[in-house]
Image (tube, rainbow, N blue to C red):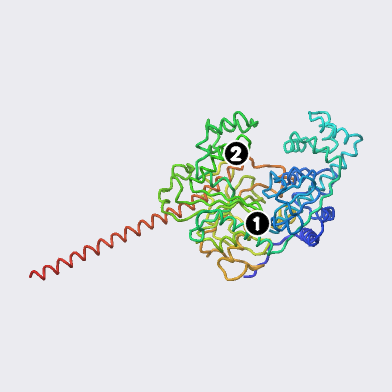
Amino acid sequence: MKCTSPNRSEDEIKLYMRTYYSLLRTTEEVQIRTLEGTHVGTHSALHLHAGDLEPDMSAFIYGSLRLPACIRQVRLVVLGQTEEVFHRRGFTHIEDWDAVAAPGRRRRMLYDGAETLAAFIGSISDVDDIVPILTAFQIEWNKMHTLINLETGLTERLVAWASAGVPDPALDEEARQALRLSVEDWARLHSIWRDRLAEWLATIAGQRKRLAVRLLAGTYVDYRRATQRWWSHVLRNVSLDLSQRSVYFVSSNTHSLVNMFTGFAQRHEKELVDYLETAVDDPTLQAEAQRIQRGEVPSNWSNFLYYLLKKYLAAPAGATLRAEQQAYEAAAGITRIPSRQTFDLEAQVIELANVNPADVDPRLQDLPLDKLAASDAVILNIDYPLGFGAYHLLSRVVASAGDLLGLYIIGKAATLSARIGDVLIPNVVYDEHSRNIYLLNNAFRASDVSCYLVHGDVLDNQRAITVYGTFLQNEAYMKNFLNEGYTDAEMEAGPYLSAVYEFIRPKRFPTDEMVNLSRAPFEIGVLHYASDTPISKGVNLGTQNLSYYGMDPTYASTVAVLRRILTLETEKAIEREGDKAIKRGNEKAIERENEKAIERENEKAIK
């Protein structure tokens, strides 16, 4: 059925996208400065003050958190799907480069130690993400460069401060005033740069940023080939034949499902609490632990332990525990498969028959988990991909995995009307990529999540919009969707549902249609937790961080998904037991009838 897309204001955004895609077709470098004008013209909700003289700290911090620290030295960013693609384009020793990471974006990146950064991409959504981030970062960097150099001698003083490596409160305040930043914005810069603040300021003062980007391969086939290589790596590193197993597909993260199945954090509670008290410099977190233990707040203690475990494993002190965790998970039937040579996307295979009921999270223990022992099903959990990469990934998985019993998506979203920390449950999804409106019978209702959520609300029967990218939306654009009843903006649901369409229909997903997926042969469950409010002026992921409180909606959603999967699987086991009992009863009845027939024959013979 053809549909009319929701009313929207997108001319500036489409112009911006056409501009950088046109430029990226070249085999040479594209200078980011050529995109600055169209970037400013989009009036992005994440970059409200792009055209102002004063720095837009929300946009700059957002970009900084999604780029590695070496971006200070980087001039050229090279985009490719696999190591082979980089090799073919002349980057022959890329595997010897240093692996670098960004705190706010999961992406495989390698740095040559000089001026080149290689970023591995899985779909066009990575391009829609990286290019605007680089452009926003450069715009704000150069604003700060200009303001610092308006103050006579400030550059030299900042360089001296960076060399000295000691605090200088007076110069710190002088730099803040020169940059025309509020005390709040300055504190946010301190929080992300910490003891490297002086180094960053000295580098910004010393040179304008002149970034360039180069796309090595960008065809549909290139992305599909990279996804196929990723999936082949997964199949090689799992000991069972997924094509012969029933599969529950979950798109979430790398920690929540595993934590809830293994009980590893609870087993190491004392060690984690000792780490909090002796090594974590966070009085707020320590106070929260005390309030939970005294029963002063309703927060879940298991969630708190999971958060501590994540922090501890990321710290040098957690190296021994990391090795122990890997061995423990393997013994519990959980296989982790990190990506190699392609984009950064970890997969986990969890065999339900190996789940130990005594280890699982307390919120799951009321289920008849002993029935799982006879299950042949596995959970294939994927660290959620970015944007259209979800389509490539699910298309590849369903083509070679076994019987798909359920598709469950847990992810972040921007909310147009709710609050950060709320959980949104859509049954309508408008997809920017296909311009389709997907109708689905979501497996979840508000009541499935609300009893496990402490700090937020759960809103079901919502309408979601799958956007191209975080920077590729503006206030007018979002308000148009809000007027049409769309309250949930994210990046993966639409591509996943396009792949579902191809799974149940004999053709590629359509465009500009109303698509009803309510008759899909497996369950579809979508849970989004709000991490961003783009219509609020300047309030985005650069200004707020879910941090520990993000564990609340994450684990409430995870509990709902796992309870659904485990309920389905245990009900199947109980049904099988009932069928066996009926079969045994029938066999005994037949046996009794046979015995009676023999007795009658014997009586006749005697007579």
SS under mark 1: loop
SS under mark 2: helix
Q: Please tell me in which quadrant of the rendered image residue 70 appears.
A: top right
Residue that extends furthest to the right in the rendered view of this protein: 152
Q: Amino acid at mark 1?
A: Tyr
Q: Give whichever of 478, 66 is nearer the camera.
A: 66
Query: Which of the two discs, 2 and 1, labels the residue nearer the N terminus?
Result: 2
Left or right, 204 with respect to 443, comes to right
Q: How many marks?
A: 2
Looking at the picture, how far across and down is residue 246, in whole percent?
A: 48, 58
Left or right, 547 with respect to 145, comes to left
* Disc assigned to residue 313: 2
Left or right, 441 with respect to 49, comes to left
Q: Is residue 472 above or below residue 320?
A: below
Q: Residue at x 57, y 36 (%)?
A: 320
Looking at the picture, how far across and down is residue 378, in whole percent?
A: 49, 54
Q: Give whichever of 429, 153 is nearer the camera.
A: 153
Looking at the picture, how far across and down is residue 302, in whole percent?
A: 53, 39
Query: Could one spot residue 147 in this view of the protein?
Result: yes
Mark 1 neighbour density, 10 Å: few (under 14) some (14–19) many (20 or more): many
Mark 2 neighbour density, 10 Å: few (under 14) some (14–19) many (20 or more): some
Q: Amino acid at mark 2?
A: Leu
Query: Could one spot residue 475 in this view of the protein?
Result: no
Q: Residue at x 56, y 56 (%)?
A: 236
| Quarter of the C terminus within the rendering | bottom left
Q: Give whichever of 130, 485 is nearer the camera.
A: 130
Q: Please tell me in which quadrant of the rendered image residue 142 appears.
A: top right
Q: Give whichever of 47, 481 is nearer the camera.
A: 47
* Disc assigned to residue 486: 1
Estimate the spatial distance between the alpha carbons at disc 2 and disc 1, rounded to whole Å: 39 Å
